């Protein structure tokens, strides 16, 4: 093969492995499943936290702020985190961060379950999830490359991108099912469970070959933002696949921002939504009795008996010829079946 001018050697097209052969790479199914569970927990955490902020504050602004905090770490620290991940064992980095997120998820579960949760707690929680996303992008994805090698890398990255997109749907759906069936706190508990399973799979995954992990890694004397930018720009220029991936990512993020702006601008949101509190009506008929007798002998004694029930917000009554009407309004969250269990009066 003739040499090119300047001593450059012509590039050869790398033979790409099939998805079937990719699944036979030792350890890759473990890594893929772990990554899928992490993405599902991340998007489920975003949905559950947004639901929590809306329920507590009913403020579109605060809900948007909580959601934005998920992406702030990547926006601010992506370059530095990438340089750091090159200097440490990537699997250990991912394990450490995900293990730290488990008690954070469980803390939110306990706060919601015990009723002590406040809106401000959602903000550092979302930022912590953003840190996990930052580590996933800068450490776990290179770990996939180290695991499968350059031959399978295009298929592995395509599957990873597809899994991330699918997990955004699965995570929000799972969060909605848990909240509707078991309550808001169950949403955080479910995401913590997914993180635990992801941790176990990542822990059991065979360690990528250390020699392969050091392959083509030049010795570095120190961190330089300029050198990192130059290296990244060179990779983008040389790789058509990387340019396409970055282009799709940029377009999707622009569309996401546009949809958010349009939704925030035109979506109708009521500051004080209609809420029907639990109500129980007690009606008593006493034929032939006038209003004074009804008031003294029926309405007032019944009010005294009913007033001993826990959770009552307001009692209104009226007495008329032959009938007594008492309306009992309970606090939000009181079950109507329990509220209707009014003690008998005799």
Image (cartoon, rainbow, N blue to C red):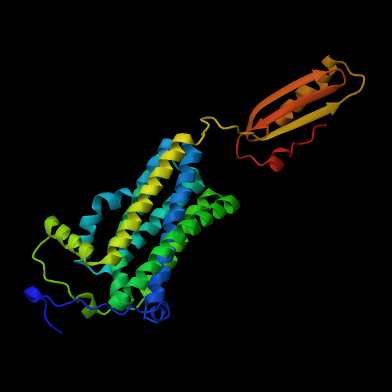
Image coordinates for residue 40, horizontal then vertical, percent: 45, 60
| Residue 294 vertical position relative to residue 200 in the rendered view, above or below | above
- The residue drawn where x is 28% and y is 50% is 75
Number of marks in picture: 0
Is residue 235 or residue 281 the one in the foreground? 235
Which quadrant of the structure image shows residue 87? bottom left
Q: Where 345 falls versus 106 (above or below)?
A: above
Q: Residue at x 26, y 80 (%)?
A: 209
* Residue closest to the far right: 288
Quarter of the figure that contains the N terminus: bottom left
| Residue 172 visible to the viewer | yes
Q: Is residue 238 left or right of residue 218?
A: right
Q: Is residue 82 above or below residue 334?
A: below
Query: With respect to residue 161, does 72 lie above or below?
Result: above
Name the foreground residue: 14 vs 22.
14
Q: Is residue 168 left or right of residue 73?
A: right
Q: In the rendering, at what x and y percent does residue 113 appear?
A: 51, 48
Name the one closer to the observer, 31 or 18.
18
Q: Residue furthest bottom?
A: 1
x, y (%) of residue 221? Answer: 8, 65
Residue 336 appears in which quarter of the rendering? top right
| Residue 96 image point, x, y percent | 31, 63
Q: What's the residue at 74%, 39% (across, down)? A: 341
Report the residue at 17% width, 75% height from top. Answer: 216
Quarter that holds the C terminus: top right
Report which quarter residue 315 is drawn in.
top right
Q: Specify whether residue 121 is in view.
A: no
């Amino acid at each position: 093969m003739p040499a090119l001018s300047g001593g450059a050697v012509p590039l050869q097209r790398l033979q790409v492995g099939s998805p079937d052969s990719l699944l036979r790479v030792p350890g890759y199914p473990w890594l893929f499943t772990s990554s899928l569970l992490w993405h599902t927990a991340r998007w489920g955490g975003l949905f559950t936290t947004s639901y929590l902020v809306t329920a507590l504050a009913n403020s579109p602004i605060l809900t948007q702020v909580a959601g934005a905090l998920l992406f702030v770490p990547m926006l601010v620290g992506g370059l530095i985190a990438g340089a750091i991940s090159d200097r440490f064992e990537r699997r250990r980095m991912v394990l450490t961060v995900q293990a730290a997120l488990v008690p954070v998820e469980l803390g939110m579960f306990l706060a919601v379950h015990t009723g002590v949760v406040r809106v401000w707690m959602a903000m550092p929680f979302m930022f912590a999830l953003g840190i996990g996303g930052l580590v996933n992008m800068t450490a776990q994805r290179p770990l996939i490359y180290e695991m499968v090698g350059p031959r399978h890398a295009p298929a592995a990255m395509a599957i990873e991108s597809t899994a991330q997109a699918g997990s955004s749907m699965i995570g929000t759906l799972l969060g909605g099912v848990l909240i509707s069936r078991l309550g808001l706190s169950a949403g955080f508990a479910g995401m913590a469970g997914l993180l635990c399973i992801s941790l176990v799979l990542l822990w059991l995954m065979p360690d990528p070959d250390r020699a392969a992990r050091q392959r083509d890694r030049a010795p570095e004397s120190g961190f330089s933002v300029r050198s990192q930018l130059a290296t990244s720009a060179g990779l983008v220029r040389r790789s058509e696949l990387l340019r396409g991936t970055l282009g799709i990512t940029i377009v999707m993020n622009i569309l996401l921002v546009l949809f958010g702006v349009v939704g925030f601008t035109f979506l109708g949101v009521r500051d004080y939504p209609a809420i029907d509190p639990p109500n129980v009506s007690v009606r008593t008929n006493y034929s032939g009795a006038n209003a004074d007798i009804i008031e003294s002998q029926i309405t007032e004694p019944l009010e005294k008996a009913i007033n001993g029930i826990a959770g009552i917000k307001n009692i209104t009554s009226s007495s008329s010829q032959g009938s007594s009407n008492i309306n009992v309004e309970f606090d939000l969250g009181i079950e109507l079946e329990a509220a209707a269990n009014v003690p008998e009066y005799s």
